[in-house]
Image (cartoon, rainbow, N blue to C red):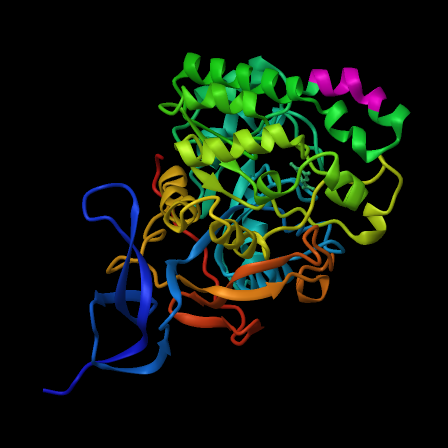
């Protein structure tokens, strides 16, 4: 009988595998065989042949990292980013799948706009992709159908205005949206009424140090309190994006039955006033980066299980735009390429166990969004794999950034821990900081409820 030849075997790596009975990951030495874009076998040792073999001795092998919050700006704002440059940045950073946000121009609020994004993405994305549908006043009645469009990662609502025009600020409309459909609804939670009342602080002070004073703790807390009340009233599950205050974490800790929680590497790494001293408007984002006591409580929430997911909120703006005087400068910082190295550095500094980090960008992400066939190194699953060298020391620099904006708030930061290979659908697309095979990305499939 002739011996089987696989497309790819990853040998000798330390793999992050699902625990046999519990919802967590364990580290184990294993070989992984891949063919036809699927994981065919995971075993202590695989001796069959392969068209390509990666020796992962000394390296860690993760399920492909999923970044469930990126803004790639196409259509309409391609001078900041497009689907090709955004997904190039993703795979260079060890990310195999992205979920892209609806605040483009036009906003993604109709079937036509959504399908336009899918058409644009076809054969141009280095990573896998899905898109969010924006919830808005004018599509409330169609939300239940729209959330079920193939490759839709869910409905995203801006409760406070940020970049773009999407906004649902009032409880009546929010309740109507929550009453329709079944999938988890995703929220940017800042209270628009309070933002409007206090905007004068930003205008009068004209200094990014006051960004988190204008968009203060109460702005976030009021909004999340309203949101939790509406979720309870309607019985609908919600996902609260980029939680930036310790006070919200206290509320969300007791709401795990109904609410899942995302945090960002920025909120775990940068804090006020230092970040505004060093970066000025280049640290300006919504919700804002706040004082260290919030950062410390967000870390606590990561460790105690309140937090489910880490996303980047990759939100590129050009240097020219960021150089405008505050508050004319737009909010948002890029992050899809730096998510993995920044978090691996935190792991190496003893801030969290490696397993916990990987859970929050793979297994948990798949659970929260109801992703089919991804999020685990498991036989039969899609062969999306991120390989990292936990010992590799590098300095993050603007030169390395593939995003069209060409900068990162982490420029000059020395980190330990770096992605060495990004494998998308069984194909090695990034190796040694180079994109070696373009456009392997496919649209992601979802369950009808999550
Ligand atoms: O700072 C932000 N920028 N927060 C958001 O929610 C949107 C993002 C953007 O798209 O620029």
Residue sitting at x 38%, y 29%: 182
Give the position of the C terminus as an image quadrant. top left
Q: Magenta stretch mostly in which secondary structure?
A: helix
Magenta span covers which residues?
193-201
Q: Quadrant of residue 306?
A: top left
Q: Is residue 311 left or right of residue 352?
A: right
Figure quadrant, ligand 1: top right
Q: Quadrant of residue 32?
A: bottom left
Give the position of the N terminus as an image quadrant. bottom left
Q: Is residue 303 above or below residue 52?
A: above
Q: Is residue 253 above or below residue 292?
A: above
Task: State the residue lying farthest toward the front.
Answer: 350
Task: State the residue lying farthest toward the bottom.
Answer: 2
Disc tally is: 0
Residue sitting at x 54%, y 60%: 416
Q: Position of residue 197 (x, y in %)?
A: 78, 15
User: In front here: 445 or 51?
Assistant: 51
Q: Position of residue 180 (x, y in %)?
A: 44, 23
Q: Position of residue 112 (x, y in %)?
A: 57, 44
Q: Is residue 72 above or below residue 269?
A: below
In this orientation, does residue 123 appear? no
Q: Is residue 45 above or below residue 225?
A: below
Judge whether residue 320 is colored magenta: no
In this orientation, does residue 190 appear? yes
Task: State the residue lying farthest toward the left.
Answer: 1
Q: Position of residue 335 (x, y in %)?
A: 62, 51
Q: Is residue 118 left or right of residue 289?
A: left
Residue sitting at x 37%, y 63%: 61
Q: Is residue 412 left or right of residue 423?
A: right
Q: Quadrant of residue 162?
A: top right
Residue sitting at x 59%, y 57%: 337
């Amino acid at each position: 009988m002739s011996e089987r030849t696989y497309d790819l075997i990853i040998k000798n790596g330390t793999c992050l595998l699902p625990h046999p009975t519990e919802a967590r990951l364990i580290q184990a030495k294993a070989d992984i065989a891949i063919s036809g874009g699927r994981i065919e076998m995971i075993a202590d040792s695989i001796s069959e042949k392969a068209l390509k073999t990666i020796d992962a001795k000394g390296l860690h092998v993760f399920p492909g990292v999923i970044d469930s919050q990126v803004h790639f700006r196409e259509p309409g704002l391609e001078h900041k980013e497009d689907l090709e440059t955004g997904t190039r940045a993703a795979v260079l950073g060890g990310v195999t799948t992205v979920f892209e946000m609806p605040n483009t121009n036009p906003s993604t609020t109709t079937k036509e706009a959504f399908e336009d994004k899918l058409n644009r993405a076809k054969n141009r994305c280095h990573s896998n992709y899905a898109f969010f549908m924006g919830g808005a006043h004018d599509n409330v009645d169609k939300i239940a159908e729209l959330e079920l469009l193939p490759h839709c990662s869910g409905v995203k609502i801006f409760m406070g205005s940020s970049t773009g025009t999407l906004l649902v600020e009032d409880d009546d409309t929010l309740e109507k949206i929550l009453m329709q459909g079944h999938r988890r609804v995703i929220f940017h939670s800042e209270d628009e009424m309070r933002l409007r009342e206090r905007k004068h602080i930003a205008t009068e002070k004209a200094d990014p140090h006051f960004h988190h004073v204008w968009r203060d703790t109460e702005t976030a807390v009021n909004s999340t309190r309203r949101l939790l009340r509406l979720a309870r009233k309607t019985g609908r599950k919600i996902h609260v994006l980029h939680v930036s205050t310790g006070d919200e974490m206290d509320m969300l800790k007791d709401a795990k039955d109904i609410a899942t929680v995302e945090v960002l590497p920025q909120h775990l790494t940068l804090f006020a006033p230092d970040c505004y001293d060093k970066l000025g408007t280049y640290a300006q984002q919504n919700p804002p980066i706040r004082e260290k006591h919030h950062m410390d409580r967000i870390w606590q929430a990561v460790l105690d299980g309140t937090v489910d997911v880490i996303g980047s909120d990759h939100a590129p703006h050009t240097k020219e735009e960021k150089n405008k005087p505050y508050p004319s400068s737009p909010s948002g910082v890029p992050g899809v390429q730096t998510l993995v190295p920044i978090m691996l550095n935190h792991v190496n500094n003893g801030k969290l166990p490696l397993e916990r980090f990987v859970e929050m960008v793979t297994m948990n992400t798949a659970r929260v969004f109801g992703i089919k066939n991804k999020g685990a190194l498991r036989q039969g699953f899609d062969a999306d794999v991120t390989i990292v060298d936990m010992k590799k020391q590098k300095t993050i620099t603007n030169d390395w950034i593939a995003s069209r904006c060409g900068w990162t708030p982490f420029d000059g930061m020395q980190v330990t821990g770096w992605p060495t290979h990004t494998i998308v659908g069984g194909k090695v697309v990034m190796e040694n900081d180079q994109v070696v095979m373009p456009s392997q990305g496919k649209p992601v499939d979802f369950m009808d409820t999550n």
